[in-house]
Image (cartoon, helix red, strand yellow):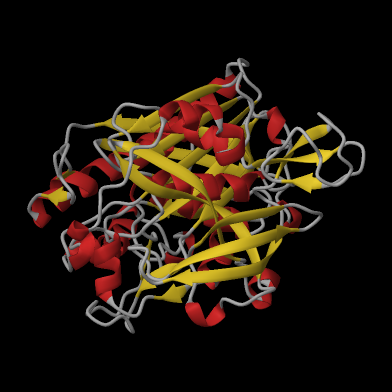
Amino acid sequence: MVGIAAYGAYIPRYRLGAETVGWNSRQERAVANFDEDSVTMAVAAGSDCLARRDRSLIDGIVFASTTPPYAEKQCAAIVAAALDLRNDIFAVDVANVLRAGTNALLTAVDAVASGRVRQVLVVVADSRQGPPRGETERASGDGAAAFVIADQGVVAEHVGSHSVTDNMLDAWRSPGDPFVRTWEDRFATEEGIERIVPGAVSGYCQRTGTALSDVAKLALYAPDARRHSRLARQLGFADNQVQNPLFGSIGNTGAAFAPMLLASTLETAAPNDLLLTVSYGDGSDVVGFRATAAITHASRPTMGVSGWLETKRILGHYETYARWREVWTLDDASRRPAAASPSVSALWREEDKNVRLYGARCRNCGYVQYPAQRVCVECRKIDQGEPLRLSETPAELFTYSMDYIAGAVDTPLVVAVVDFEGGGRVLCMMTDRELDEVRIGMPVEMSFRKLRVVNGIHNYYWKAIPRRTPHPAAVAA
């Protein structure tokens, strides 16, 4: 059978909420940090999904987003490198439409069902921006989901799909547009989502012989909370069948919204539950999965949607978020020299060190070094190092310094020396931190982040972040 063998998610640490000065809304929404984008969030979700799996068995990767950092360069290749996947895999980017996430899932299902590959990683991430303090901004959020589609060991079997394609200009963003544009609300609702989605769901039910009462949980896309509840009622689903859309805590995460709700349903699903995922955007995809006997507590990801929800921090000021999104810039930005363009040849040459985060363990004495060196500093043996991926190794803060004049977006710049469990040490920046929590010995983990963008080149590297673990009550639930 073909279906979902593993799943994961990622939600940024920070939220705009009722306590945020200048936000003027009781709703919370997840916001990516200044050094996060759809690629870094996809890496985090992929890591959550693959935490207990042999990633050498992954035969392909599909990356989906409406906000990829590159217009011409494959983002799936970046994510594959950061997750340390094999290089003899196929890679696909799916973009430019809000149902890109379900498009990606169906692409992976078809690839596995054809027998061409055995396991495909699907990563979906989005960070869409609406005009400041507008309705789109209030309803939106940032996040990512990831799934392994396989033909064995599945926790949810694929049980059919139905797609509708309809040319509908209700929300769009042209090259150079910083914000999503939308048409008149009533037209977009009545002639868009409320006309297209019911037809797609009806088509799925007819094709698969499914009754609405057969559905245990519905992962339903909608632009906002009001239209979500209205659409669910229009479709004929009972309240207990509809998965919580999390509009008051995360927001609409664009292409990742329906996949994140699917991941959330999997966390609480029981064997034989029918989980229906409905996306929207120039049509609709309806994708069904039925939970198998393998869906147990042990199959849940390390964090998942519920875990990331528990580990949040409310931003103090809307101004901080606006600065992160470059709605306005720092006063002293023009007084600093422009950053030098990174060397493309150096980025290629140092991929193992900077993107895969490989150190080396000496075969003779076991000493771990980062970056890898030909000579072991412990036993002085030459060329005895074996590659060691450090990106998911637990670590702690050995020492740090704070730079208040570096011109960083997030002042002060925290420069950290991090010690890995089992050996190895790295000098890096620290992000997602509050100054009152930074201390020597604090548990940290590595996070793939964006350093800067110069000449259109997105330069990525690993930074340290405070270790995020869900509250024990959430784990028990």
Identify which residue is drawn at 37% across, 70% down: 411
Identify which residue is drawn at 63% across, 35% down: 84
Would residue 166 be found to the left or right of residue 362 on screen? left
Relative depth, front residue between 385 and 12: 385
Would residue 69 be found to the left or right of residue 60 on screen? left
Image quarter in which the C terminus is found = bottom right
Image quarter in which the N terminus is found = top right
Depicted 223 relative to depicted 385: above or below: below
Q: How many marks?
A: 0
Whether residue 435 appears in this view of the structure is yes
Identify which residue is drawn at 52% across, 82% down: 436
Q: Residue 155's x, y, as percent?
A: 67, 44
Question: Hey, which quadrant is residue 423 in on the image?
Answer: bottom right
Q: Residue 370's x, y, as percent?
A: 69, 45
Q: Residue 470's x, y, as percent?
A: 62, 70
Question: Hey, which quadrant is residue 301 in on the image?
Answer: bottom right
Depicted 382 relative to depicted 267: above or below: above
Whether residue 275 appears in this view of the structure is no
Name the outermost residue toward the left: 184
Question: Hey, which quadrant is residue 458 in on the image?
Answer: top left
Depicted 453 relative to depicted 226: above or below: above
Relative depth, front residue between 352 and 289: 352
Q: Residue 65's x, y, as percent?
A: 36, 40
Would residue 447 be found to the left or right of residue 31 on screen? right
Identify which residue is drawn at 64% across, 69% down: 399
